[in-house]
Image: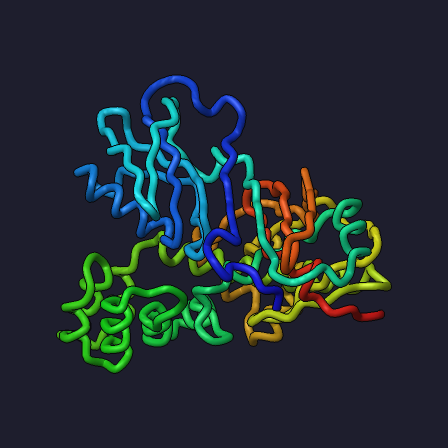
Amino acid sequence: MARIKVKPEDFKVREVLKPGFLKGRGYRVYSLWKRGLETEEAIKKVARISGVSHRFIAYGGLKDKNAVTVQFISVPEKFRLKEMADRNLKVVFAGFSSRKISPSAVNGNFFEIYVREPLRYPERVDILKEFGVPGYYGEQRFTPVRGNSFFVDYFVRNDFKKALFYLFTPAGWESSRGRKGKKLFVAGRFGEAARFFSGWRKKVALFLEKSNDFRKALSFVPESEIKFQFNVFQSYLFNRYLGELINEKADEKLVFRYKLGEMIFPLERIHLPEKVPVFYPEVGGLYVPFLKEMGLSLDQFSNFSMFFHRFDRETVVPVKDFEIGEMADGVMLKFFLPSGHYATNVVRSLFDAVKRRK
């Protein structure tokens, strides 16, 4: 694997708002610079210092923890966040807007990535500039996936106990307190686990301390959490479909293996549909072969249509303003990607993918 993020300064991300977003009144908008912090972790710290509930602070997307990132946050105009500057966190007022910050406000991200190894395949740069990069969801999208299974797999089969325990299995970054509570929960020690939780997790644990009704316990889980799990499942299926599509079209290709399968990158310009619908029951035909592999059918999703996002995703995205420069022990990459796309896919295609012939 390419050596990136050895230090937070090796991976810099600067969020770019859509033109004209900073106009009108109703919300105060701030730039949030952070180093070595999760987005939500940083926002909670800002909220605590400012005396504002974190529930009123909106943001466009989660940014990497092991990185130096700049993004935008907003609060209703009646609130005011404290401007600050310390070693790992800076908040600066950026202006007013008639809308709160959300993913739709973000045009994309500009990246500066220090890869601590030489570029061994310079010919890959040409195809990147000419063709772009496939629109896969990056491997970090699947950090919430426990093992090789999905919450959705249990949920649509009405296995409510396994679905609930899935949500309480540690995955990715966790505070030591949260991880301890989850371990107690999956051990069936619900009363003890409740002491480490707040919000809906605490309600679930306290309920199960007195009841064995896992279906009822799931009703305490917010719809937003269930939708998130469905969206992760959609992302996985999209990656599978796009990989198969590229594998069929390209004679020369590169393959990068990650925890849930393969990302296939073409080494030549190929013709692909501009966009493909992500999976939801009404357009599920594209994804039936992958569902069958998992022992699932379209019919099982018919009652859960409300949990799916509905949109078409780009099969290929342009890598704009691309620059590459030699450093003492590696290279510096600079480029812009549209919102919702992953810089790690650019790195994997240039450094980590292995050549495969059809």
Residue under the point 28% across and 71% down: 179
Residue at the extreme front of the image, as rendered: 328
Residue under the point 34% across and 48% down: 88
247 or 287, nearer to the observer? 247
**Quarter of the image where one finds residue 188:** bottom left
Rendered position, 123 above or below 289: above
**Quarter of the image where one finds residue 85:** top left
Position of 110 compared to 215: left or right?
Answer: right
Rendered position, 92 above or below 171: above
Rendered position, 20 above or below 75: above
- Residue 143 screen position, x and y as percent: 46, 64
Q: Can residue 42 be seen by looking at this rendering?
A: yes
The quadrant the N terminus occupies is bottom right
152 or 180, nearer to the observer? 180
Q: Can residue 207 be seen by looking at this rendering?
A: no
Rendered position, 129 above or below 236: above
25 or 154, nearer to the observer? 25
- Residue 232 screen position, x and y as percent: 49, 59
Position of 256 compared to 121: left or right?
Answer: left
Residue under the point 52% across and 52% down: 11
The colour scheme used here is rainbow
Residue at the extreme bottom of the image, as rendered: 187
